[in-house]
Amino acid sequence: MRKVLLVTGASAGIGTATARLAATRGYDLALNYNSDRAGAETVARAARDAGARTLICQADVGDPEQIARMYREVDGAFGRLDALVNNAGVVDRSAPVTDITHERLRRMFDINVIGAILVAKEAVLRMQAQGDGGAIVNISSAAARLGSGGQYVDYAASKAAIDTFTKGLSDEVSRENIRVNSVRPGLIETDIHAKGGEPGRAERLAHMVPMQRPGSAEEVADAILYLLSDAASYVTGSILEVTGGR
């Protein structure tokens, strides 16, 4: 029987790469997106071609009511949940802290932190009720360690919160065989840089990476699928860096 995986932010970047790879590894997929319906449909077609059953569910994870609706759709389509990749997130344009507004902070933390925690909460409730464990991978960022001064300190702080949440939640649920880990991507070639106003950022900063290149979304997906898999059965509360050594 194929396991059921929910991927938030599945319509582009790391979410897309993760969903595509998971379909080839035996997962059925609930694919969440907020605004890019076409991207989600493209991923769903590729997943179905790989043998996966798919559900596309629109929801802004910054809104608790939409999170609840998303889970009702997952429950109705699959009746269970075995794994979660907590990937949905936002960045904003580079700015010093002195230029950051309350509105920007609310958006950043509502989606990247509060939304991620509530999405994980609902996943845990289902895994506990099923009684046979599960796996959660939260997507963090090397920015949590680097601080991103002069760029995205608010984004870095939101991802540091995710790392702390990962450790705390893993301690709470490990006795129920629910494993919770995070992945910290570094400079990855995705469209998140363009959304932050710097489409060439990954290539521009590649010289700062010991491996002298940006990573790919597929390389991050490989790390995520490892943490979801039985090969990582004794790994929980951990942070896996995918940063090229940076």
Image: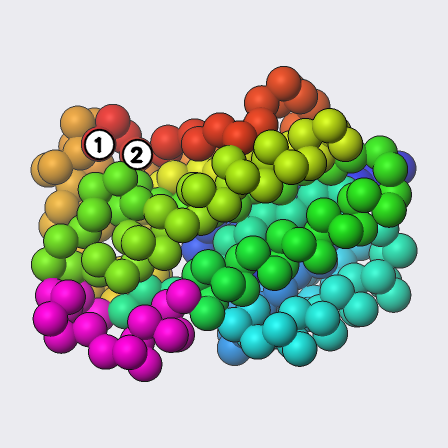
Q: Which of 2 and 130 lies nearest the eye of the viewer? A: 130
Q: Is residue 226 left or right of residue 76?
A: left
Residue located 21% across and 27% down the image = 211
Residue 74 point in image, percent of width and height: 79, 62
Residue 105 point in image, percent of width and height: 32, 71
Quadrant where the image shows the C terminus: top left
Q: Residue furthest bottom?
A: 103
Specify the amino acid type for callout 2. Thr
Secondary structure of the residue carrying numbered label 2: loop
Specify whether residue 160 is painted magenta. no
The answer to which quarter of the image holds residue 44 is: bottom right
Q: Which of 164 and 96 lies nearest the eye of the viewer? A: 164
Label 1 CA crowd tier, 10 Å (few <14, some 14–19, many 20+): some
Q: Is residue 125 left or right of residue 84?
A: right
Q: Is residue 49 above or below residue 41?
A: above
Residue 108 point in image, percent of width and height: 37, 68
Main secondary structure along the magenta-highlighted residues: helix
Specify whether residue 99 is painted magenta. yes
**Res 243 label:** 2
How far apart marks 2 and 1 lie (CA) works out to 5 Å
Specify the amino acid type for callout 1. Arg
Q: Which residue was labeled with disc 1?
A: 246
Residue located 13% across and 46% down the image = 205
Q: Which residues are magenta?
A: 93-109
Whether residue 50 appears in this view of the structure is no
Q: Is residue 25 above or below residue 90?
A: above
Q: Is residue 128 above or below residue 74?
A: above
Residue 101 point in image, percent of width and height: 23, 78
